[in-house]
Image (cartoon, rainbow, N blue to C red):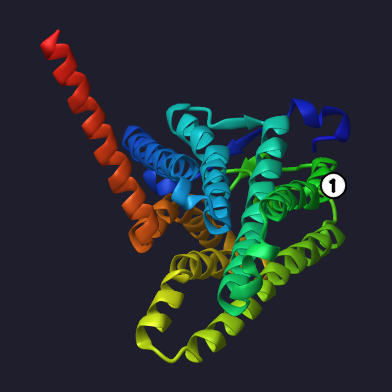
């Protein structure tokens, strides 16, 4: 048993995925490619939405902030997981584990609030278009994004502090990062009250933001159905289809993960589900938004063309000199 006096000196062993431990270098390479693709894709969205004046709109301001969230999602877990694949001991210190848990949960809650804010933005743009520019000012957008980040990082602070004060009988985490359920199950203490508190927190945050998104899209669908022309319906729906896809993928997995009773036999299923919403989904989001959004595609083409033109002019000048 590890007492509270010595928890800071503990080291947890990350079991990860036992089925791929025979090929650690291949696993490391695959994760590295995924991480590079994630960082590159999300960084590209941030740069494009900031460089192109035509994208200085609330929707793209939220999208740029969401890209930062997605990039943070994988940064919290993948670098340490890549290290674990190359480290025979596969350990993580207690403080590092608690920090990883805190930042992972904070970023996850922040993403939930971001998706809710983006759905509200689409609701105003489609259902209240005449008042949209008056309501969604730059100041309002900044406050909404700051509210998403502050809410995300404050709402999970108490649960993580309570978990850090537990005593642990087992130091082997059956997961690929320090998530709530696998860490709590290592404790020697009676954690029923703590688990109930965490469940209620997850229920309020996840289903609260989920309700905002569902309400917004019900209103959006009703408004789109009232549009008389098919081209108008298609245009209105195309402005929010990417966000809707992201919403369905993300919430489908996290509701399954966090808003349901837990048992020890669920950990293997949780690991596979966690891969989807913590690694695959944040990596695919840039692809979803760039392929489904004509304004972003046009901006990318324009900036690529301008870059080529600039390089061509530079080459001509260098040749002439």
Location of the N terminus (image quadrant): top right
Q: Position of residue 162 (x, y in %)?
A: 85, 47
Q: Secondary structure at mark 1?
A: helix
* Nearer-the-camera pick, 26 or 20: 26
Q: Is residue 320 above or below residue 187?
A: above
Q: Residue 95: which quarter of the image?
A: top right
Residue pointed to by mark 1:
162
Q: Position of residue 47 (x, y in %)?
A: 45, 39
Q: Count of labels shown? A: 1
For the point 11% across and 13% down, which residue is it? 319
Q: Residue 303: which quarter of the image?
A: top left
The answer to whether residue 29 is left or right of residue 130 is left
* Residue 261 visible to an observer of this rendering: no
Q: Residue 258: which quarter of the image?
A: bottom right
For the point 80% across and 48% down, which residue is it? 154
* Nearer-the-camera pick, 215 or 197: 215
Q: Residue furthest top?
A: 321
Q: Position of residue 163 (x, y in %)?
A: 80, 46
Q: Is residue 151 above or below residue 169?
A: below
* Residue 102 visible to an observer of this rendering: yes
């Amino acid at each position: 048993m590890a007492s509270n006096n010595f928890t800071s000196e503990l080291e947890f062993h990350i079991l990860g995925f036992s089925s791929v431990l025979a090929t650690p270098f291949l696993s490391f390479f695959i994760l590295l490619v995924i991480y590079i693709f994630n960082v590159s894709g999300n960084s590209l969205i941030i740069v494009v939405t900031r460089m192109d004046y035509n994208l200085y709109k609330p929707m793209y301001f939220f999208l740029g902030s969401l890209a930062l969230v997605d990039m943070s999602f994988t940064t919290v877990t993948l670098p340490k997981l890549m290290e674990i694949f190359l480290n025979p001991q596969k350990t993580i210190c207690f403080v590092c584990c608690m920090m990883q848990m805190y930042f992972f949960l904070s970023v996850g809650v922040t993403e939930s609030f971001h998706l809710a804010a983006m759905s509200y933005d689409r609701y105003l743009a489609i259902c209240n278009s005449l008042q949209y520019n008056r309501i969604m000012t730059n100041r309002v957008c900044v406050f909404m994004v700051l509210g998403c980040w502050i809410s995300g990082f404050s709402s999970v602070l108490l649960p993580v502090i309570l978990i850090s004060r537990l005593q642990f009988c087992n130091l082997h985490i059956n997961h690929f990062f320090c998530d709530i359920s696998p860490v709590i199950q290592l404790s020697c203490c009676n954690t029923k009250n703590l688990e109930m508190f965490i469940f209620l927190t997850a229920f309020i945050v996840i289903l609260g933001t989920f309700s905002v998104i569902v309400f917004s899209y019900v209103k959006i669908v009703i408004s789109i159905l009232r549009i008389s022309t098919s081209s108008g319906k298609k245009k209105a729906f195309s402005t929010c289809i990417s966000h809707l896809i992201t919403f369905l993928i993300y919430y489908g997995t996290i509701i399954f993960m966090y808003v349901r009773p837990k048992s020890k036999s669920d950990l293997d299923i949780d690991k596979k589900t966690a891969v989807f919403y913590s690694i695959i989904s944040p990596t695919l989001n840039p692809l979803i938004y760039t392929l489904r959004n004509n304004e972003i595609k046009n901006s990318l083409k324009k900036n690529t063309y301008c870059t080529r033109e600039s390089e061509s002019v530079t080459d001509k000048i260098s040749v002439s000199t």
